[in-house]
Image (cartoon, rainbow, N blue to C red):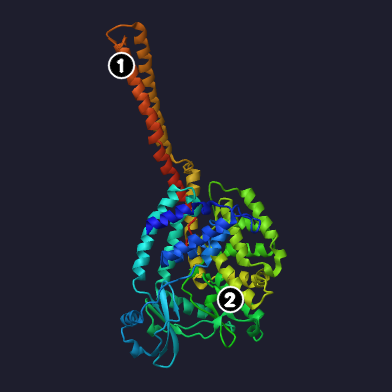
Amino acid sequence: MITRLGTLLVRHMGAFSTQSSEIPGDSPDGNKTAEDARNFTRSLEEMGPTFIKFGQLLSTRRDLLPAVYTDELSRLQDDVEVVPVEQIRARIEESLGAPVNAMFSEFDDVPIAAASLAQVHRGVTKSGRDVVVKVLRPGVRDRVRNDLDSLAGLADFVDHNTPVGPRLGAARMLAQFRRSMADELDYRKEAANLRLFADLAEDERDLVVPTPIDDYSTDDVLTLELMPGKKITDVGKIELLDVDGPALAGSLFHFMLKAMLVDGILHADPHPGNLFLTPDHRIAILDVGMVVRLPARVRTSLVKLLVAIGDADGEAAAMVLAGMGHPLEDYDAAAFRDSVTHLVSSTLAMGPDLQAGTVLMELARLSGEHGLRPPAEMTMVGKALLNLDQATQHLDPGFTPIEAIRANVSTILRAGFSPSAGQTLLSGLEGKEFIERLPRRANRILDSLAEGELSFNINAVDEDRLHMVLHQVANRLSVALILAAITVAAALLMVADVGPRLLGYPALGAIFFLIAAIGGLVMVVGILFEDRPPVRRVKRRDRRRKLYDDAPVD
C-alpha cells in the first residue's frame, strides 16, 4: 500500500507545485490536468477509507493543489460493499451487551446508507421511538491505524527530501488528519458534538439537531432520533414556494458563523448531504463527526479577515493573512499584498455570485503561490463556508454571504469582547500574581542598577554552531598549511636532486609530492561530503523550528 501511495504521489508531484492561472479556464494543458485529477481521485478511492478521508482533507488545500484537483477531491465518495447484516447485528449486540430483538421492536436489515467507516440502519426502540443506528464497520479501526502508520514514514520523507516538502508540511498535516480520524472513529465524541450543537441551536427556531440516545450508544454504535426530510439540494423549486427560503438561509448562516467565531465550534463538513429540510420547514443539522475547535487567536484573526473582505480592504486582509500564516523562504510580501488587494477589491462587484468560502479558498491559494503557508484552520473554515454556500444559495438564490457577514459583525464583535467565566477567573489570578510579585521584582532591578550589576543576556548568535564552524575552519587551515609546507619541501628536494631516484625523479621529493596530493584529495573529499550532512541537518532543524514554532496552542 505504501509503495502504491508513494508511486501515486510521485506521479502527481507536479500538481503540488503548479500555480493556478487567474484566468478562468486557462491551463497549460487543461484536458490533461483534469484527467490527471480524476485518476488521482479514483486511485485514492480504490485504496480504502483512510485515503478517501485524506483526499477529502486535501480538497481543502487550495494553497497546495490546483482548483481542478481540489474540485475532484471534494467529490470523493465512498463506494463500498454493504456489510452483511449478521455482522452488524453481532457488533451491536457485542457493543451494547444485549440482543438486537431485546432492544428494538423493529430493525431494518437493509441499510439506508453504507460508507467506508460506518453503516446506518433504521429501527424502532421498545418505547416506540423511531431511530437510526450508526454502526462502525468491523475491522475499520485496525485498517485505519495501519494506514496512518504507513503515511507517517511517507510524510517525513516528503517533508525532508522533496521540493514541495516545505510548502506541504506533510507531517503537520498528517498529525491534524490523525486527530480528525480518531474523532470520527469514536461515536461517543460525535454524541457529545450532537448535544453541543443542540445547546447552541436551542434558541434557533428554524434549526433542529437530532438527539443521541445514550443508553443505545457506545464508541462503536451511535443511536439517535430519526430526522424525517430530504437533503436541502434535493428540494425542488415547487416545494420551496411553501418555505421561507431567505429566512432559513439567513438563520443557518448566522448560526454557523456565530458557532464558529463566537463559540469556537466549526462544523467542518456542512455539505448539503448533512443538512435536511424537515416536513415542518426546519433545517436539521446531521453528522457532526467532523468538528474542529478554533482557538481564540484564530477566531480573532478570522473576524478581522472577514470584516476586511466585507469592506473590500485588501491591504488589511493581506496584513491579517500575513500574521496568520507561516512565511516560507520564498515568501514575497509585496507581491502577496498586491494579489490579495486585487482579489478582495474585485469581490464586491460579484454580488450574489460571491461565495465567502470561495474567497477564503482563493486567499489560501494566493498564500501558497507567494510562499505563505496558511493555517490549517483557515482552509477548513473556507471549505466549510464553501459547502454552506451551496445550501444557502439553493434556499435563497439572492443570498449574499458578505452582506450577511456585515449584518452579523456587531453581534460577533460584542460576543468576542465578552470573556467567559473561566477566562475572567484566570485573568484575575494572573493579575493578583502580577501585583504580588511586582514590588519585589522592581526592588531587585533597582538594586542591581544602583550596584552596577544589572546585565542583559541576549542570544543573538547560536554559539554552539559558531564554535563548531570556527573549530572546523581552524583544523582545515592547519592541515592546509602542513600540506603547503610538504609541497614546498618536495619542490626543493626535486631541485636539489639528491638521494636515490624513483622513475627518474628524486625519490624523497616524489614521496613528499605524493603525500601532499593524497592529503589534498582527502581534504577536498571531506569538504564535499562531510560538510553537506551538517548543512542539511541545520536546514532541517531550522525548518522543523519554523514548522512548529507557529503551531496552534489551544
Label 1: which secondary element: helix
The CA span between labels 2 and 1 is 87 Å
Looking at this view, name the residue that lies furthest to the bottom: 127
Residue 40, percent across and down?
Answer: 48, 60
Residue shown at 30%/6% (left/top)?
498
Sequence-wise, which precedes: disc 2 or disc 1? 2
Residue shown at 37%/62% (left/top)?
147
Q: Which quadrant holds residue 261?
A: bottom right
Identified by mark 1, the residue type is Ile
Residue 226, percent across and down?
Answer: 48, 85
Please determine whether, in this image, residue 408 is positioned above or below residue 335.
Answer: below
Name the disc covering residue 79, or none. Answer: none
Please determine whether, in this image, residue 514 is positioned above or below residue 429.
Answer: above
Identified by mark 2, the residue type is Phe
Instruction: State whether residue 466 appears in this view.
Output: yes
Residue 434, percent across and down?
Answer: 49, 60
Label 2 Cα neighbours within 10 Å, binned few <14 / some 14-19 / many ≥20: some
Residue 206, percent across and down?
Answer: 59, 83
Looking at this view, name the residue that lies furthest to the right: 349
217 left or right of 502?
A: right
Please determine whether, in this image, residue 205 is positioned above or below residue 157.
Answer: below
Q: Name the residue under label 1.
A: 511
Between 240 and 333, the one lying in front of the other is 240
Please determine whether, in this image, residue 484 is positioned above or below residue 359.
Answer: above
Name the disc covering residue 255, or none. Answer: 2
Label 1 Cα neighbours within 10 Å, binned few <14 / some 14-19 / many ≥20: some
353 left or right of 552?
A: right
